[in-house]
Image: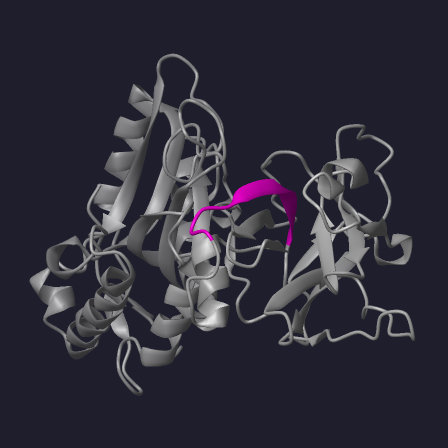
Amino acid sequence: MDLALYLYHSPLHADFALLPSPPPSNSTHPSSYSLHYQEPVAYTYSAPPSDRDDIIPLNAFWSESRDDYQTTTRDLDSLNSHGGNYVAVPELFGGYLLPSPETNHDVRLAPISLTYSDSLSSSITAPWTGSDVNSLFGDDLFRADSSTLGWAKMGDCPRCNVALSETFPSAGGADCPEVCADGTSSANAIYHVGKSDEMSGSEGGQNFLASMKVAGDVIKSFDSSVDPESGGSVHVSFEYLCCQSASELAGMRSVLAGLEWEPQEISFDRVETRIDNPPEDGGVPTHYSICVFLDEESQRAMLEWVGAVEDSMRSAGYPVNVPRSSQEPFHSTLAVVDGGTFPAEEAMARVNELVPPGSWTGEGVKLTLTKPDW
């Protein structure tokens, strides 16, 4: 996915346009659009891949009467059936979207949605829900729900932090991408920070639990039905063992029990959102996990430690089907929300403002992880 798409804003018409380059300005229609973010908000295919015949074109249209750009997967006749007398603008073609979410360990995919405004008789195409679009305007001009047009590579802008989990669709359980074969199951080892007196009672543990409470209150302020992780439920998952036989899991647990556990000192970076899995009945995924991820130094240390543990399992004759390095980075889950309507980008921005990266466990203080349960 090589074509960068940017968000342009027209204050004159309270409108945004998702385009690969600035809208043209000439005597026929001088542009009122300016770049909203310096960074791309999504990446699409500039040309159809040779091995795909199902990708979706993202067309750009212009209406002089409305002074409005629309980026949509609809064709011109369908768009004009609702008025506006739009014309195609080929030079602003938005590339090609994937029709459905797919597991891709090299490219993090994000949904590209279209959100409609009844009061403005206009729509916005962007990698956000309607609730997030409304947060940009500071008003409820747009519907809270959106329709997903397709999937693109996640952008680089400050408000582009929602993407598929590294192990989507989690068909074999948490962080286990494939369906487990008969006779196998998945398990995990978890640092139960909130339940451990040793971890929660330390200075870093107390600071972290307090930060999670602040962040959870922010999440609830957007949707009171959400139940954020707090107190005893706060945890950091160490190992996801995917699709192992019962005898393998028993042996792996024996290896874990026999290890001399090295305390790991960690700190956290920023909050991001992962789309974990699709609904059981199909359709657009709405199971979004808002997580606070470890910082780069802590990620490296934890990956080194879990790699040593996995080597011990292999040495004991137990294969590790999906190594931790191929799964979602180390994190603590803050909340699970309905991604169809929840303003994830707005909520994450608020959390990252109130609890800045690096401050989750206190200034100059780290959280010491001692021993996980399994």
Depicted 352 relative to depicted 177: above or below: below
Q: Which residues are magenta?
A: 143-153
Residue drawn at point x = 58 percent, y = 55 percent = 127
User: Total label count?
Assistant: 0
Q: Main secondary structure of the magenta part?
A: strand
In the drawing, does residue 265 fall left or right of residue 69? left
Vertical relation: 157 (above or below) 126? below
Expressed as whole percent of the image width and height from the top left, the position of residue 107 reads: 65, 49
Q: Is residue 2 visible?
A: no
Residue extending furthest toward the top? 182
Q: Residue at x 53, y 67 (%)?
A: 159
Which residue sits at x=40%, y=49%? 341
- Res. 47 in view: yes
Quadrant assignment, res 310: top left
Q: Position of residue 29 (x, y in %)?
A: 85, 70
Quarter-wise, where is residue 276 in the image? top left
Give 316 or 248, whichever is nearer the viewer.
248
Quadrant placement of the C terminus: top left
Residue 150 on the magenta span: yes
Residue 19 in the magenta stretch? The answer is no
**Colour convention of the picture:** one colour
Q: In terms of depth relative to the viewer, which is nearer, 361 or 371?
A: 361
Is 358 drawn above or below residue 249 in the view shown? Answer: below
For this rendering, which residue is in front, 268 or 285? 285
On the image, the x and y values in percent for residue 153 come to 66, 52
Q: Tell me the residue at 19%/46% (across/down).
A: 373
Q: Would you place residue 133 above or below residue 54 in this image? A: below
Left or right for 179, reference 335: right
Front-most of 11 and 345? 11
Residue 344 horizontal/vertical position (percent): 41, 58
